[in-house]
Amino acid sequence: MRITRFSSFKDTEVFFTAAFSGHDITFVPDPLSPETAALARDADIVSVFVDCDVSKETIAALPNVKLIVTESTGVDHIDLAYAKERGITVANVPGYGMNAVAEFTFGLLLNLSRNIAFASDQVREQGIFDVRAFQGFDLFGKTLGVVGTGRIGMHVIELARGFGMDVVAFDVHPNPERAAALGFSYATLPDLAASADAITLHVPYLPETHHLIDADIFRVMKKGVILINTARGEVVDTIALVEALKSGRVAGAGLDVLEGEHELHIGKDVLANVPEGHDLRPLLGDRMLMDMPNVIVTPHIAFHSKEADQDRVSKAVQIIKDYLAAASRDASTPVG
């Protein structure tokens, strides 16, 4: 079998070479896109990541592919309907990086609540040691709103309880048993927004979660709230967030993801690479967020710990091994 891995992290390629020594493996450091698809034209199996553009156009350029494995939990970068139409199996890696993302969430929250990154920048860039400019606040006794109580959301709640925080959560599928065990309560999204001192997002990106946090939700948030997003940028209405930050409704934001970040990853010449008719307002909003002094933006790295990377790649490799084993069994089964 021919296997091509796009967005290949060099330090994890050994997992592939060790598992598939009898197969033709190609590692491509660049993301899969219509422009790079030719590098996998003969591939039977393609491994991708969240920065890949696995659109209909891209898949159409892969005539031999039978399996697409995304080394991520999210699959919103893949045209699942067209893959199904082509008879291509698509697999993801759920459940990895729980600790990594939850800990990173608190890294952002602590940075904002205590002005750590901003104070460090002032000392490094200006040599100013101004204690009065950076008074923060304790997390102990504050209320954390957790939107989405899957594996990551639940681990965030466990960490929050360790900090002595009260927790209120929102989920379309609540888990009352875990709520009772961990000592938190569920509420509607508007009620959560109105009561939380900090809000963190841990929902997948689906049509139902597009702009889940919109102008209406921002309007009912407690004044001075902190917003953390390590989920997907499209869950938040970017323009509404910019306005909420300008008004002081939101005191600060920690964003590991941005709406339309795929275009931002292309490089400086964003406008030249945006499809015709594409709404540019979120991209302009992203630029405004990057320039705001009370916003921390990181390049989608919450998942990116050594342990999480090893777990993610190991699970992707196992999916491919299972697929190859099933294909081998099918090929050896007598017909008739």
Image (spheres, rainbow, N blue to C red):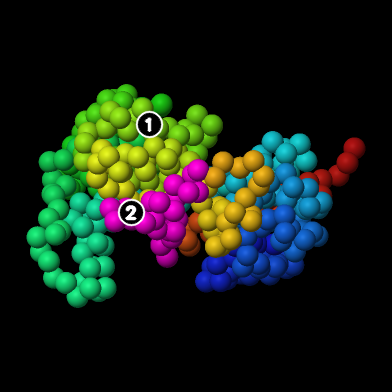
Q: From the image, which quarter does the N terminus lie in?
A: bottom right
- Percent position of residue 212, x then y: 42, 32
Q: Residue at x 39, y 56 (%)?
A: 290
Residue 28 visible at all: yes
Residue position marked by numbered label 1 in the rendering: 215
Determine the residue located farthest toward the right in the rendered image. Answer: 336
The local secondary structure at tag 2 comes to loop
Q: Residue at x 50, y 29 (%)?
A: 208
**Which element is circle 1 on?**
helix
Q: Is residue 82 left or right of residue 274?
A: right
* Image spot of residue 156 (x, y percent): 30, 45
Q: Quadrant of residue 89?
A: top right
Residue at x 24% of width, y 41% of height: 248
Locate residue 7 relative to residue 202 in the image: left or right.
right
Q: Is residue 294 magenta?
A: yes
Amino acid type, label 1: Ala
Is 181 left or right of 24, judged from the image as shown? left
Q: Amino acid at mark 2?
A: Met
